[in-house]
Amino acid sequence: MSKKKTMLIIIAVLVLAGGYFVYTKFFKQTAAAAQYQTATVQKGTLVETVSASGAVTTANNTPVVTQVTGKITKLYVNNGDAVTVSQPIAVIELDQASQQKYLQQLASYQSAQNSLTSATNSELTLRSAMLTAEDNFKKGAIEKGKDPDSVTYITLKEAMKAAEHSYENQQNVIHQSQLSLSSAALSLQQFSPTIKAPISGTITGLFLQEGSVIPAQAVSSGTQTLSQNIAYITTSNLPIVSVSLTEIDIPKVQIGNKATLTFDAFPDKTFTGRVFSINTTGSVSSGVTSYPTTIILDTENPGIYANMSATANIIITSKDNVLYVPSAAVISQNGETVVRTLVDEQVNTVPVVTGISSDEGTEIVSGLNEGDVVVTAVISSTTSTSGTSSPFGIRTGGGGFGGRGF
């Protein structure tokens, strides 16, 4: 054999060996490196929920407010004291501006009082006139047997009806006067030097002391009079949270559904409650419709304040002793719901019938058995074991991935 032919044979062998190496090292290994995340079909309890976010609208804390300015001369309570509605909390020595406002409100209150007194006196007069007209009709027409078509009978009857009508109208006048007096009394209280408890409960958040001054800028803004909060009264009211549900979720929710709630202020605590009301009219903002839904908590908590952010999970359905898989395992393929199972390192596609879904997973009504291994994700199909790349751009190494590989 010539030297040239020998060289050609050697080159051919090297090329074949190199090709075999590339095939076994890259292509074959790549095909065999598919890896999957898997899970086992389990049996347990599934709870289907609807999630929504919102805020506390009503908490068990009522503010104690005033619209006057001046110096605190007397405090009747301390933090932790129990108070009843209208019990004095503090006395303020009013400054000149607040004195003027108080006198204006006092004049309005006294005027409302006078109007009620006048209306009450008029009622007495009208009642007397009504009784007199009824007596005249009885004696002048009925007892004397007057003809109902006679002038005397008609005149006395109309006089009686007019007196009755005037008396009934005066009842409405008195009711209106009472409402005006109540409104004037509330306005007077807002500007009174004596601050009273608006509700019964326990004093919290009181930060003023005798001698403290409520400055004018704290309760006024231009022509608008603002209220200054000096304390809170904690009551036994259950906190209420308002959340917004989408038009997809709202048909699923019913009044009375139980819910779990978390608050940004209490990241490690979970509270329970129930759906209290649903606004089925809804509201539209930027083309998106939402339905305000209120949830009342099951227990009191003095640390929950109005406007705190909250997240609610409203329980729609709960099922015990059902088969379920992670929701990621359930996919749609050619219009059919399927799950990929892993048996003897072989992936099989299995049609399934599903039920409810929750954070834990999706219910499997039929198609799988407890203990079956299902694929939840494909981690990689091109992983190899070295850290270099081939001349063909194929990575030849590096660490492997977690999960099942074959």
Image: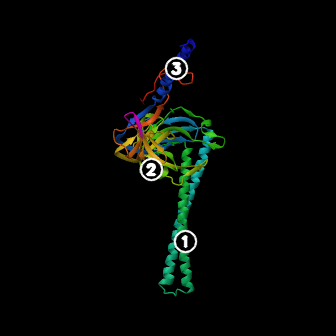
Mark 2 closeness class: few <14, some 14–19, many ≥20 residues within 10 Å: some
Q: Secondary structure at mark 3?
A: helix
Residue at mark 2? 276
**Range of residues picked out in magenta:** 342-348
Residues under labels 3 and 2: Cα distance?
Answer: 75 Å
Q: Which quadrant would residue 176 be assigned to in this image? A: bottom right
Front-most of 157 and 245?
245
Mark 1 closeness class: few <14, some 14–19, many ≥20 residues within 10 Å: few
Q: Decide: is 285 above or below 398.
A: below
| Mark closest to the chain's N terminus, 3 or 1 | 3
Q: Quadrant of the C terminus?
A: top left
Q: Secondary structure at mark 2?
A: strand
| Residue 335 shows in the view | yes
Residue at mark 3? 18
Q: Residue 404: percent from the left, percent from the top?
A: 41, 30
Q: Secondary structure at mark 1?
A: helix
Residue at mark 1? 165
* Residue type at numbered disc 2: Phe
Mark 3 closeness class: few <14, some 14–19, many ≥20 residues within 10 Å: few
Residues under labels 1 and 2: Cα distance?
Answer: 45 Å
Foreground mark, 3 or 2, reads 3
| Residue 200 shows in the view | no
Residues under labels 3 and 1: Cα distance?
Answer: 117 Å
Front-most of 378 and 288?
378
Is residue 190 one of those drawn in magenta?
Answer: no
Give the main secondary structure of the magenta stretch: strand
In the picture as drawn, the residue positioned furthest to the top comes out as: 3
Q: Residue 33: percent from the left, percent from the top?
A: 46, 28
| Mark closest to the chain's N terminus, 1 or 2 | 1
